[in-house]
Image (spheres, rainbow, N blue to C red):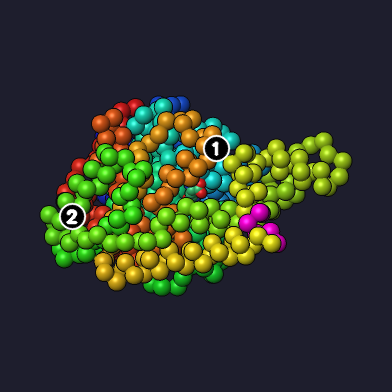
C-alpha cells in the first residue's frame, strides 16, 4: 500500500486497526521525500534521526493515543519548533534554534503528531512565489518550471507531492490559500484570533494566522480541531469555544446563500480560472444553494492598503533582528552601529529590505497620518463591505488567485505584478475573516485552479460545510501530479 498518499483520517483509521504502524508510514514518506524533493525542494530542514526518535517515543507511549497519533506534519519555517533550526528561510536567522515550541506545535505533539520537516517559504513570508527563500526556490509539483505560490509554498508543495500527510502554513495576505490554490490542495486561513500566534515569528501581527494545508477538507477540520482555541500566551487569541469541526462536514448546502462579488470578476482574471469558478458555482446551485451577485466596493484599495499596513508592522517586527540576540551576525565591524548595518545589510534579502524601507517610511513622523493612519481607515471600510455583504449571504465565493501558477522568474523583478497575485486573498486578512481554498479544476496545461470560500468571523463551520459538500461531488482533490 502507498501509505504516503493517504489522508490523515485514512491513516488514523489504519493505525487504529493496527493495519499500519507510525514507523511504516514514516519510512514510506522518507522514501517518497528522497525520490521527489531533489526536484520539488519543498523542505528546508529534514532530520531523519529526529523523526525516528519521535516515532520510537510515540510507540512506547501507545496507551495515550492522541487525535493525530502517528500522523506526520510538515511545519512552515516561521513556526518555532524547540531545538530545531527555525529561520523564516532567511540568512539573518541562520542557526537560530528556538528554546520553546509554538503553541500549535505543543498541541500537535500532545495529540501524537510527528513533526516531519520544516518547509521552505518566502523570506519572512514576504512573497507569493516561494522564490525569495535563502535556500532557493521551491518548484510546483504540477510543473517544475513553475512557482508553487507563496509564501507557504514549501508546505503546499510538500502536501501536493505526497511528501507529508499534513502541513502548517501561515497567512498574512494569502500565504496559505494562494499556494494551496496553485498546488491543488486544501488551505484554510482561520479567523484572526482563532489560532494562537505564540511561536509564529511575526510578519504583520494584526494580520497573521497559522492554518492547515491538507489533501482534503476532512483533514483540514481534524487539524483545526487540534490547533484552535484560546492561549494565555497570545492575548489576541479569542476565548470562544472551539466546535468539533468534523461535525460540520455535512453534505448539504441546501438553501445557503452564496454571494459572488462583482469586483472580483474584472480585468486581470484569467479566463480558464473564471470558467473553473463559474462551473463550481453551477454545482453549488445544483446542490440547492442560491447564488447572488454582491458588491465589495472598496476592493480596489485592498492591495495598496495591505502594503501600507503589512509593511509598517513588518518594519517594526523585524527591528529585533540586529545580530545581537538571534541567528546570524556579520563579522568585520569596528563599532556597534557598523555591526547592525553589516548584519542587516547582508542578512536580509532584497524583498525584506524593500518592505522594511517601505514600512519605516509609512510610519515616520510627517508621513504617519498621511499613510499609516489613512490605511487603517481604509481597512475599516473594507471590513464594513464584508459586514454589509454578510447581511445578505452566508458565504462569499471567489477565485483564490487571478491566474494559475506562473513560471519561476517571471515576476521576481516586478514587485507590483507579484503583489497583484494576492488581489483576492488580501481583503480577508484586513477584515480578519476565515477563508478556505479548495481545488476546483485544472486549466488546459493541467495546472490546478483554486476556489476561495469566505465566511463571517468564527464561522469556519460554514467553510467546512460548503467545501466538504463540493468535495463530495467532485474529484479534483483526488488528482495527483506525476513526479
Ligand atoms: N503575498 C503576500 C505578501 O507578500 C502575502 C504573504 C503572506 O500571506 N505571508 O505580503
Mark 1 highlights which residue? Answer: 132
Tell me which residue sits at (41%, 61%) in the image.
Answer: 298
- The earlier-in-sequence mark between 2 and 1 is 1
Q: Does the magenta stretch include residue 38?
A: no
Q: Distance between the residues labelled 2 and 1?
A: 38 Å
- Compared across the picture, whether 357 is left or right of 4 comes to right
Which quarter of the image is occupied by the C terminus? Answer: top left
Q: Is residue 24 something one can see in this rendering? A: no
Name the element at disc 1: loop
Instruction: Identify which residue, 160 or 136, lies in the foreground.
Output: 136
Position above or below: 45 against 325: above
Question: What percent of the width, then of the height, locates residue 155?
Answer: 43, 43
Mark 2, other Cα within 10 Å: few <14 / some 14–19 / many ≥20: many
* Region rendered in magenta: 360-365
Question: What percent of the width, then of the height, locates residue 372?
Answer: 59, 61
Position above or below: 238 against 275: below
Which quarter of the image is occupied by the N terminus? Answer: top left
Amino acid at each position: 500500500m502507498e501509505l504516503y498518499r493517504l489522508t490523515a483520517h485514512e491513516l488514523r483509521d489504519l493505525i487504529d486497526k493496527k493495519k499500519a504502524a507510525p514507523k511504516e508510514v514514516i519510512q514510506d514518506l522518507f522514501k517518497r521525500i528522497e525520490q521527489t524533493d531533489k526536484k520539488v525542494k519543498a523542505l528546508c530542514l529534514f532530520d531523519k534521526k529526529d523523526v525516528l526518535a519521535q516515532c520510537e517515543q510515540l510507540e512506547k507511549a501507545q496507551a495515550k493515543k492522541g487525535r493525530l497519533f502517528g500522523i506526520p506534519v510538515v511545519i512552515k519555517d516561521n513556526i518555532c519548533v524547540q531545538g530545531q533550526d527555525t529561520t523564516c528561510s532567511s540568512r539573518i536567522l541562520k542557526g537560530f534554534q528556538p528554546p520553546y515550541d509554538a503553541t500549535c506545535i505543543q498541541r500537535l505533539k500532545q495529540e501524537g503528531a510527528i513533526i516531519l520537516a520544516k518547509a521552505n517559504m518566502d523570506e519572512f513570508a514576504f512573497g507569493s512565489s516561494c522564490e525569495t527563500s535563502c535556500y532557493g526556490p521551491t518548484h510546483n509539483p504540477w510543473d517544475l518550471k513553475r512557482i508553487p505560490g507563496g509564501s507557504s509554498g514549501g508546505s503546499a508543495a510538500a502536501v501536493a507531492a505526497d511528501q507529508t500527510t499534513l502541513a502548517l502554513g501561515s497567512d498574512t495576505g494569502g500565504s496559505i490559500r494562494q499556494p494551496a490554490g496553485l498546488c491543488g490542495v486544501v488551505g484554510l486561513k482561520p479567523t484572526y484570533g482563532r489560532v494562537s500566534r505564540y511561536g509564529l515569528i511575526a510578519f504583520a501581527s494584526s494580520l497573521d494566522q497559522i492554518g492547515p494545508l491538507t489533501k482534503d477538507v476532512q483533514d483540514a477540520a481534524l487539524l483545526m480541531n487540534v490547533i484552535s482555541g484560546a492561549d494565555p500566551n497570545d492575548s489576541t487569541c479569542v476565548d470562544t469555544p472551539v466546535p468539533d469541526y468534523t461535525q460540520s462536514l455535512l453534505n448539504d448546502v441546501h438553501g445557503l446563500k452564496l454571494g459572488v462579488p462583482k469586483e472580483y470578476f474584472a480585468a486581470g482574471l484569467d479566463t480558464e480560472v473564471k470558467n473553473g469558478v463559474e462551473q463550481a458555482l453551477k454545482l453549488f446551485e445544483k446542490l440547492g444553494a442560491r447564488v447572488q451577485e454582491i458588491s465589495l466596493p472598496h476592493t480596489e484599495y485592498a492591495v495598496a492598503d495591505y502594503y501600507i499596513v503589512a509593511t509598517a508592522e513588518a518594519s517594526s517586527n523585524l527591528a529585533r533582528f540586529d545580530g545581537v540576540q538571534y541567528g546570524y551576525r556579520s563579522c568585520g565591524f569596528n563599532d556597534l552601529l557598523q555591526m547592525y548595518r553589516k548584519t542587516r545589510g547582508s542578512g536580509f534579502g532584497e524583498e525584506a529590505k524593500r518592505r522594511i524601507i517601505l514600512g519605516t517610511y509609512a510610519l515616520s513622523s510627517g508621513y504617519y497620518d498621511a499613510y499609516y493612519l489613512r490605511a487603517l481607515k481604509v481597512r475599516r471600510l473594507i471590513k464594513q463591505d464584508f459586514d454589509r455583504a454578510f447581511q445578505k449571504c452566508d458565504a462569499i465565493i471567489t477565485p483564490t488567485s487571478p491566474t494559475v501558477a506562473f513560471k519561476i522568474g517571471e515576476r521576481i523583478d516586478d514587485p507590483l505584478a507579484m503583489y497583484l497575485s494576492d488581489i483576492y486573498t488580501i481583503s480577508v486578512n484586513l477584515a480578519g475573516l476565515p477563508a478556505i481554498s479548495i481545488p476546483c479544476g485544472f486549466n488546459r496545461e493541467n495546472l490546478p485552479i483554486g476556489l476561495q470560500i469566505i465566511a463571517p468571523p468564527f464561522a469556519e463551520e460554514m467553510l467546512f460545510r460548503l467545501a466538504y459538500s463540493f468535495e463530495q461531488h467532485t474529484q479534483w482533490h483526488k488528482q495527483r501530479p506525476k513526479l
